[in-house]
């Protein structure tokens, strides 16, 4: 792991609906979470890899949680749990909120060919590890980790939760399926809730997030230098929701 060097305060401020000074202070606080960073770095080092695929903006995730103060957060895609850990740390600082994570772990082949050993996917689990293996035990009481296909788990969360304040969508996605998932959960998002979707390095805004933002009268905002987009949702049209 390497420390995030240039977090995007403008992006945080736009999504949190706050001034730039508050966003910068929240990012400074995130960067000072050296105990958390040290734990994650040591866990990854033990597995012989510098990193596993994650959103490359953990400080922004932390800052958004501190500023928005969500009660219910959904995360789709976990891998080693770097993003999960920063979300959980911020919830702990807020002294409120639960992170509901959905993951369908990818495991390396049990018997890879010695002559043509396939490269491990950047999000695959090390042998003997489970989803979110790097997340500190002290943060797990606020964590509802659900293992399964998002097509099965997200509808259950939509039934279980009365509201969703933040969505972090960090899995490869296809616009038609993703659009259906976003719209199925839409009624649970109040005005001012935040949704983020990672499109991979250099990825462009997907039509699924763009359509959802348009439906809520909002404009997606891209994080500088990454294929990461977020939207601060407006009221649901035709419902009088506030």
Image (spheres, rainbow, N blue to C red):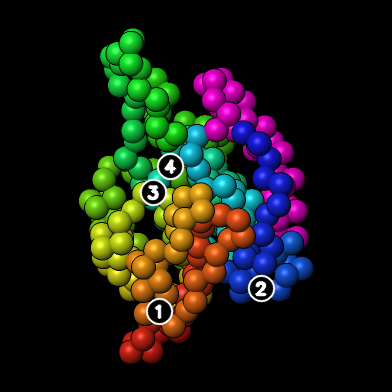
Would you say residue 59 is visible in this rendering? yes
Where does the C terminus fall, quadrant-wise?
A: bottom left
Examine the residues drawn in magenta and state their main secondary structure: helix
Determine crowd level at label 4: few under 14, some 14-19, many 20+ residues with C-alpha closer than 10 A: many
Q: Dot 4 corresponds to which residue?
A: 78
Mark 4 or mark 2: whose residue is earlier in sequence = 2
Residue 63 percent location from the top left of the image: 64, 57
Q: How many marks?
A: 4
Res 127 quadrant in image: top left
Q: Which mark is residue 214?
A: 1
Q: What residue span does the magenta drawing correspond to?
A: 25-51
How much space separates mark 1 and mark 2, taking CA atoms?
21 Å
How much space separates mark 4 and mark 2, taking CA atoms?
28 Å
Q: Dot 3 corresponds to which residue?
A: 171
Q: Dot 2 corresponds to which residue?
A: 18
Would you say residue 168 is visible in this rendering? no
Mark 4 or mark 3: whose residue is earlier in sequence = 4
Res 24 quadrant in image: bottom right
Q: Secondary structure at mark 4?
A: loop
Which circle, 1 or 4, is nearer the viewer?
Answer: 1
Mark 3 or mark 1: whose residue is earlier in sequence = 3
Determine crowd level at label 2: few under 14, some 14-19, many 20+ residues with C-alpha closer than 10 A: some
């Amino acid at each position: 792991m390497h420390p995030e060097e240039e977090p995007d305060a403008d992006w945080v401020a736009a999504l949190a609906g706050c001034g730039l000074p508050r966003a910068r202070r929240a990012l400074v606080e995130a960067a000072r979470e050296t105990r958390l960073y040290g734990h994650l770095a040591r866990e990854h080092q033990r597995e012989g890899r510098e990193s596993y695929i994650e959103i490359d903006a953990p400080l922004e995730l932390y800052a958004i949680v501190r500023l928005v103060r969500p009660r219910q957060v959904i995360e789709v895609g976990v891998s080693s749990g770097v993003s999960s850990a920063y979300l959980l740390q911020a919830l702990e600082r807020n002294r409120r909120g639960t992170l509901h994570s959905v993951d369908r772990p990818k495991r390396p082949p049990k018997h890879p060919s010695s002559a043509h050993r396939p490269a491990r996917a950047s999000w695959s689990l090390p042998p003997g590890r489970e989803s979110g293996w790097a997340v500190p035990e002290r943060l797990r009481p606020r964590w509802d980790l659900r293992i399964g296909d998002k097509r099965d788990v997200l509808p259950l969360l939509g039934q279980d939760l009365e509201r969703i304040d933040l969505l972090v969508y960090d899995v490869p996605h296809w616009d038609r399926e993703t659009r259906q998932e976003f719209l199925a959960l839409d009624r649970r998002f109040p005005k001012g809730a935040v949704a983020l979707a990672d499109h991979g390095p250099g990825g462009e805004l997907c039509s699924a997030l763009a359509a959802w933002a348009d439906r809520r009268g909002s404009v997606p905002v891209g994080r500088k230098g990454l294929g990461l987009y977020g939207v601060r949702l407006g009221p649901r049209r035709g419902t009088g929701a506030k």
